[in-house]
Image: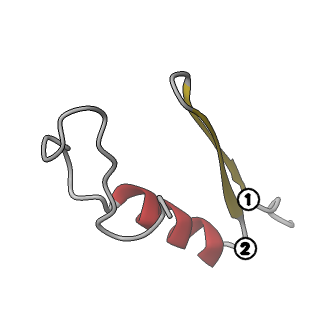
Amino acid sequence: FIFKKFRRLSYGNPGMEKGFGLGLSYVKRIVEMHKGMVRVISEIGKGSQFELALPALKK
């Protein structure tokens, strides 16, 4: 849901969101291109925590 392109969430005044809603969709796409994953844990009133996991580089 939050990883969709152009998705912006409102925190009070609707229509006052900043940005274009592209950042998280790009992060998810790039991480998945590298065989990784993105996870979000969110609590209303407390905020959100994002976790990125990428595979280790083999030498």
Occupied quadrant, residue 21: bottom left
Instruction: Determine whether the residue tagged by mark 2 lies in a helix, strand or loop.
Output: loop
Going from the N terminus, do you reach mark 2 or mark 1 first?
A: 2
| Residue 12, disc | none
Pick whichever, 32 or 17, lies toward us.
17
Q: Position of residue 7 (x, y in %)?
A: 34, 62
Q: Quadrant of residue 53?
A: bottom right
Residue 32, quarter of picture: bottom right
Q: Which residue in the rendered view is the most extreme toward the right?
A: 58
Q: Return the x and y of residue 51 as percentages of the image width and height.
A: 67, 45
Q: Which residue lies furthest to the left in this view?
A: 15
**24 versus 50 height, above or below:** below
- Amino acid beneath label 2: Lys
Disc 2: which residue: 35
Q: In this view, does 39 lie to the left or right of 9?
A: right
Q: Residue at x 37, y 56 (%)?
A: 23
Q: Where is residue 13 in the image (x, y as percent from the top left)?
A: 18, 35
Position of 44 relative to 17 (above/below):
above
- The amino acid sitting under disc 1 is Leu
Residue at screen point 54% across, 65% down:
28
How is this picture coloured? secondary structure
Question: Disc 2, disc 1: CB below 8 Å?
Answer: yes
Q: Mark 1 points at which residue?
A: 54
Q: Which of 14 and 49 is in front in this view?
A: 14
Q: Where is residue 17 in the image (x, y as percent from the top left)?
A: 20, 44
Q: How packed is label 1: few (under 14 Cα within 10 Å), some, or many (20 or more)?
A: few
Give the distance between the C-alpha atoms of the residues marked 2 and 1, in whole angstroms: 7 Å
